[in-house]
Image (cartoon, rainbow, N blue to C red):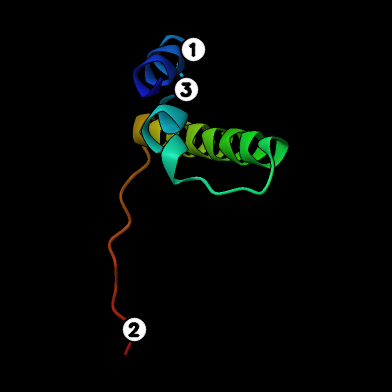
Amino acid sequence: MEQTIEEYAKRLKLSWIRQHYQEVEATSNEEFLLKLMEQEIQQREERKTNLLLSHSQLPEVPTVPFN
């Protein structure tokens, strides 16, 4: 069954779910599904933000230590 779940998640392009679904704990099926979807959305938003930042060609700002 694990192989089937991972294959379906791959085909549906649910990368976070495919890699982490066994780590999610919930008290009901609905809560489990909700947590999976929330994490998948969060991962996609983070990847999108990082991709846009990397393609933005903004100048790098040097880090200055605070004393």
Which of label 2 and label 1 is nearer to you? Answer: 1
Q: Rounded to the nearest whole Å, what is the CA distance between mark 1 and mark 3?
A: 6 Å
Residue corresponding to mark 3: 14
Judged from this view, the residue extending furthest toward the front is: 1
Kindly give the residue lying farthest to the bottom in the view shown: 67
Q: Residues within 10 Å of mark 3 (few under 14, many from 20)?
A: some
Where's residue 2, x and y in %? Answer: 38, 24
Residue placed at 55% from the left, 49% from the top? 25
Asked whether the residues under the numbered discs 2 and 1 touch, taking CB atoms below 8 Å apart as contact, a structural biologist would say no
Instruction: Say which amino acid is labelled 2.
Output: Phe
What is the distance, in whole Å, between disc 2 and disc 1 at their CAs? 46 Å
Q: Position of residue 38 (x, y in %)?
A: 61, 39
Q: Determine contact: label 1, label 3, CB under 8 Å.
A: yes
Mark 1 lies on residue = 12
- The quarter of the rendered structure image containing the C terminus is bottom left
First in residue order: circle 2 vs circle 1:
1
* Pointer 2 residue: 66
**Amino acid type at mark 3:** Leu
Q: Marks 2 and 3: which is nearer the front?
A: 3
| Direction from residue 10 to residue 12 in the image, left or right | right
How many residues crowd around disc 2 within 10 Å: few (fewer than 14), some, or many (20 or more)?
few
Q: Quadrant of the N terminus?
A: top left
Residue 32 is left or right of residue 8, and the answer is: right
Query: Which amino acid type corresponds to the residue marked 1 in the rendered image?
Result: Leu
Q: Are marks 2 and 3 in contact (CB under 8 Å)?
A: no
Is disc 2 placed on a helix, strand or loop?
Answer: loop
Q: Residue at x 39, y 31 (%)?
A: 51
* Total numbered labels placed on residues in the image: 3
**Towards the viewer: 11 or 25:** 25
In the image, what residue occupies the spot 45% across and 12% down? 8
**Which one is earlier in the sequence, the residue at label 2 or at label 3?**
3
